[in-house]
């Protein structure tokens, strides 16, 4: 799935690694492409994120950065943002794939059957060194 998802400028892959503490129903989720994007700015990121969440209830994927501690705590951090990620970044996926032990669910405004075929036809990368040592 990750090789297939690499065609998108943004994707998020969440894997539970067979974590057995319940209740869990999914082995992994892949969110690919972005219908809507939220980029929070320092100082108002959390309030603006709440507006974004309220405008589109449902699945959102993204991250909250360390800089948000300046909005939630009575401290000031002067660390330089060397990787240039915004303090908050979330997106609504164009395609979401949920995999459980019993089924694969593809949610998309497009053709789910075509997406399934593309996934199944995606070449699998093989680590030759690992095979040679087995």
Image (cartoon, rainbow, N blue to C red):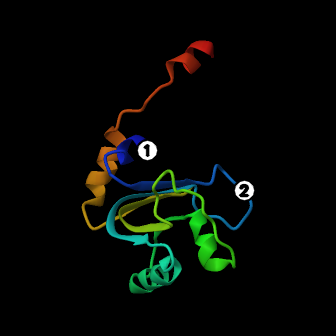
In the picture shown, does residue 27 fall above or below 134?
Answer: below
Q: Locate the C terminus and report the quarter of the image it occupies.
A: top right
Left or right, 97 with reference to 108 = right
What is the x, y in percent for residue 59?
46, 72
The disc at residue 67 is none
> Neighbour class for label 1 at 10 Å: few (<14), some, many (≥20)?
some
- Residue placed most toward the observer, 52 or 122: 52
Q: Nearer the viewer, residue 120 or 66?
A: 66
Report the number of numbered marks: 2
Residue 49: x, y in percent? Answer: 47, 79
Q: Earlier in the sequence, mark 2 or mark 1?
A: 1
Q: Height in image: 54 above or below 93?
A: below
The picture places residue 99, in percent across and down from the top left corner, at 50, 56
Which element carries disc 2, helix, strand or loop? loop
Tag 1 residue: 2
| Side (left or right) of 42 relative to 22 | left
Q: Are marks 2 and 1 in contact (CB under 8 Å)?
A: no
Question: Which one is nearer the viewer's eye here, 61 or 127?
Answer: 61
- Residue 93 location (% of width, % of height): 37, 65
Q: Who is closer to the viewer here, 102 or 76?
A: 76
Q: Is residue 37 left or right of residue 49?
A: left
116 w.r.t. 98: above or below:
above
The residue that label 2 is drawn on is 20
Instruction: Determine whether 93 is above or below 11 in the image.
Output: below
Q: Residue drawn 60% across and 58% down? A: 79
Mark in front: 2 vs 1: 1
Q: CA distance from mark 2 to mark 1?
A: 23 Å
Q: Name the residue located 43 percent from the left edge and 44 percent from the top edge.
A: 2
Name the quadrant containing residue 22. bottom right
Q: Quadrant of residue 120?
A: top left
Q: For the residue carrying disc 2, how many other residues have a C-alpha within 10 Å: few (<14), some (14-19), or many (20+)?
A: few
């Amino acid at each position: 799935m990750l090789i297939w998802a690499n065609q998108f400028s943004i994707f998020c892959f969440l894997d539970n690694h067979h974590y057995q503490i319940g209740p869990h129903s999914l082995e992994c989720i892949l969110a690919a492409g972005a219908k809507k994007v939220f980029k929070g700015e320092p100082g108002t990121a959390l309030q603006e994120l709440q507006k974004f969440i309220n405008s589109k209830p449902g699945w959102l994927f993204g991250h909250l950065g360390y800089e948000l501690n300046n909005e939630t705590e009575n401290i000031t951090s002067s660390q330089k943002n060397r990787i240039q990620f915004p303090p908050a970044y979330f997106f609504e996926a164009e395609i979401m794939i949920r995999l459980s032990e019993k089924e694969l669910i593809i949610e998309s405004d497009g053709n789910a059957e075509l997406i399934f075929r593309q996934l199944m036809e995606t070449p699998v990368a093989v680590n030759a060194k690992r095979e040679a040592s087995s």
